[in-house]
Amino acid sequence: MKPWVEHFCFWRSFGDEAKFATIAFIPLFISIVLPIAYPLFMSLTYANQSVVERTAVVLDADNSAHSRDMMLSIDATQGLSIKRRVDTLEEGIQAVMSREADAFVFFPDDFSAKIKRLERGDMKVYVYATNMMIYAATLTALQETVLHKNVEIAVEQIANPKGVTGDKAYNTIDPIQYDKHILFSPTLAYSTYITPILFCLVFHQMGLLILGFSIGFHRERDKSFAQKSLWLVDYFLRYLFYALFIGLGTAFVYVYLCPLFAWHRGDTPIEIMKLIWVMVACNFPLAAALASFCRTRYTAFQLVLGTTLIFFTLSGYVWPHYAMPLWIQPVTQFLAIDPVAQGIIKIAFKGATFADCNREVAHLIRLFAIYTAIALVVIHRRLIARPFTRAWHKIRPAK
């Protein structure tokens, strides 16, 4: 076979990569084991799906009917219970600081007396706030309890003495009642919210990592490979080999793992999986461009691991785009994880299907074209520069 014919037999790259992967093993481990192991670990970590029970300690210096009734109401609140009573203010604060309890509630000795004089009774609350999830949930539970007790006391001390009783008394004291409807995420489970983007980030980064790792590994082991000029199609076929295994990993995660841990029900995992597949395909040119810079396998790890937090932050999933600085917002439009994150929100929480994500898919197709143009310039920079170099040498011969 003539050399130029052999050079354009791109299908050989697929076979060479398959042979290399079975010998080296590590690329196969990255493309098969890690895309399953990471989501499995995350699923086990978030198996409870939410912070179920929060605790509080109480110091009742008043020891009155009002303070005791308030303690009973706090203990009856869903997701919040009184763990024990403490004897001093310092002991209560220390219980929160040492993570024995999530909150410390203190009733001063004039709590009931102020209420009877139609003054504000001070109930002091100390909440553990280094974890925002625990802080928000604990404070919300306490606020709802206080709001409910305020209405009861107002009815007892103001409405009833005036002869207003029953529902009319409650309507007089609390005339506005809001009817809360939580759209798209009625359970408010943090795990149900965060796991889709984490799974997406895993497959996004694995797609970028595996090709650069493989090319870098090749160049380490084979010096002749380091001198070889690879065409974009060479990169594509090598990427295709690993993308097939990553695709199987996504199928396992979304077909088996998501229903097993009840992250999402019905066809939602399948619809998300389709979007992930499009993202993995879209990322090929970007992965090829990055791989062209990988002289060793460790270069790939540095490139990918260094961008993981950036992709996660700029996805718009955990922090909205409109809250980002104006100069950063255009940058997010050039990341494949951005439209995928918006598509996941549509599918996972708004009941959409893959067919409803036309805008996101079109965005990915545009990014594929942009990434391809970048990859062609980066990978074939030597081939592109060669005619200009020859012309320059003709004009100005070497001395």
Image: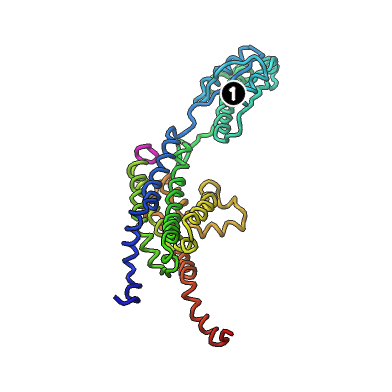
Q: Amino acid at mark 1?
A: Val
Q: Nearer the viewer, residue 343 or 161?
A: 343
At horizontal 38% and vertical 66% (from top left) the residue drawn is 234
Q: How many marks?
A: 1
Q: Main secondary structure of the magenta part?
A: loop
Evaluate whether residue 204 shows in this view: yes
Percent position of residue 93, x then y: 65, 23
Percent position of residue 318, x then y: 53, 46
Quadrant, the N terminus: bottom left
Percent position of residue 241, x then y: 34, 58
Give the side of residue 237 with respect to residue 148, left or right.
left
Residue stretch in magenta: 258-265
Magenta highlight on residue 260? yes
Magenta highlight on residue 289? no
* Secondary structure type for disc 1: helix
Give the residue pinned by disc 1: 151
Query: How would you rate the neighbour count of disc 1 (Cα within 10 Å): few for under 14, some for 14-19, many for 20 or more?
Result: some
Q: Quadrant of residue 149?
A: top right
Task: Name the outermost residue toward the left.
Answer: 1
At horizontal 37% and vertical 37% (from top left) the residue drawn is 262
Q: Nearer the viewer, residue 112 or 364?
A: 364
Quadrant, the C terminus: bottom right
Q: Eyeballing the image, is 268 above or below 17? A: above
At horizontal 62% and vertical 54% (from top left) the residue drawn is 325
Display colour scheme: rainbow
Q: Nearer the viewer, residue 242 or 282?
A: 242
Give the side of residue 33 with respect to residue 149, left or right.
left
Percent position of residue 179, x then y: 50, 34
Evaluate whether residue 171 shows in this view: no
